[in-house]
Image (tube, rainbow, N blue to C red):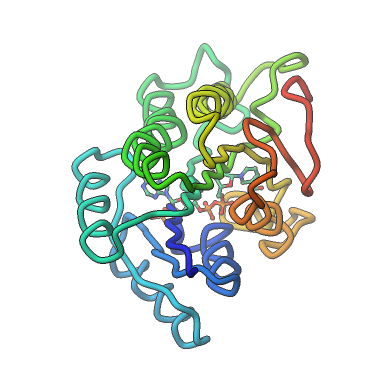
Amino acid sequence: MTGIAVVTGANRGIGLETCRQLAGSDCHVILTSRDEVRGQQAADILRQEGKPVSYHQLEVTDMASVARLRTDILKEFGRVDVLVNNAGVYLDEGISVIEVPLETVQLTMDVNFYGPYHLCRAFVPLMRQQNYGRVVNVSSGAGSITEMNGRTAAYKISKVALNALTRIVADEVRGYNVKVNTMCPGWVRTEMGGPAAPRSVEEAADTIIWLATLQDDGPTGGFFRDRKPIPWSEL
Ligand code: NAP
């Protein structure tokens, strides 16, 4: 069976590479982006590589946009097997929790937490109904709590919330063949990570693909990097 996979924030960076690798692993990929022109261009590149890729516009903070995506996918494909919540923003690097504008915190939560939450609400019930689904939340080691230090609060708190969402959704679908996991891609050379980052997008996407294509006896409710569990309380 060819699975239907949805990837958010996929016009560039880790999301685009995730689409490329998923489309090479027996999935038909729906590449989504908030900017239609940039997303269509990214989808064209993958199609020129011979990959099975469709395009759909998606602004993850907009529930109407999420609803349109769901309606159109159901009409065309009738199911969703994989959801990769990749879209993210990193807007308050190094800024004090006291000084960061509240609008920045709200926008970060809207994209990094409410976005994945809206998408889970749209697609997890469908996965439960079809008794198959793999959700991968692209989080960060910055979302671990125990030794969390100051600054960059919006990003860190948004990823803590995303990790909590992962645990909660995973538990609510236990008993179904629906796996919900969160992962850290490491520090990656993208627009977000910058050119000095040690990791390539290919390396970053590897664990995402592994979680997106888990066997039925694979883990759920876990936090991973490099295909290995990492502690929720890590630095
Ligand atoms: P990136 O190159 O900055 O790409 C981010 C993607 O998210 C872009 O496609 C962007 O679209 C999209 N996006 C932002 N806001 C959106 C919205 N409201 N609706 C839909 N799409 C939206 O970042 P990346 O490095 O590939 O990061 C991908 C994920 O990995 C993020 O969740 C990030 O937190 C996580 N991560 C990255 C690193 C790293 O070192 N790079 C480390 C840890 C975790 P536009 O092009 O329209 O802006």
Q: Is residue 218 above or below residue 80?
A: above
Picture coordinates of residue 197, whole percent (x, y): 74, 53
Name the foreground residue: 71 vs 151: 71
- Left or right for 57, reference 209: left
Name the foreground residue: 26 vs 154: 26
Picture coordinates of residue 56, whole percent (x, y): 30, 63
What residue is drawn where x is 75% and y is 43%? 225
Q: Quadrant of residue 199?
A: bottom right
Q: Is residue 152 above or below residue 17?
A: above
Q: Quadrant of residue 44?
A: bottom left
What residue is drawn where x is 69% and y is 23%? 144
Q: Quadrant of the C terminus?
A: top right
Q: Is residue 127 above or below residue 15?
A: above
- Left or right for 45, reference 182: left
What residue is drawn where x is 60% and y is 69%? 21
What residue is drawn where x is 44% and y is 31%? 108
Picture coordinates of residue 185, whole percent (x, y): 69, 47
Picture coordinates of residue 72, whole percent (x, y): 22, 59
Name the foreground residue: 137 vs 159: 137
Name the foreground residue: 214 vs 88: 214
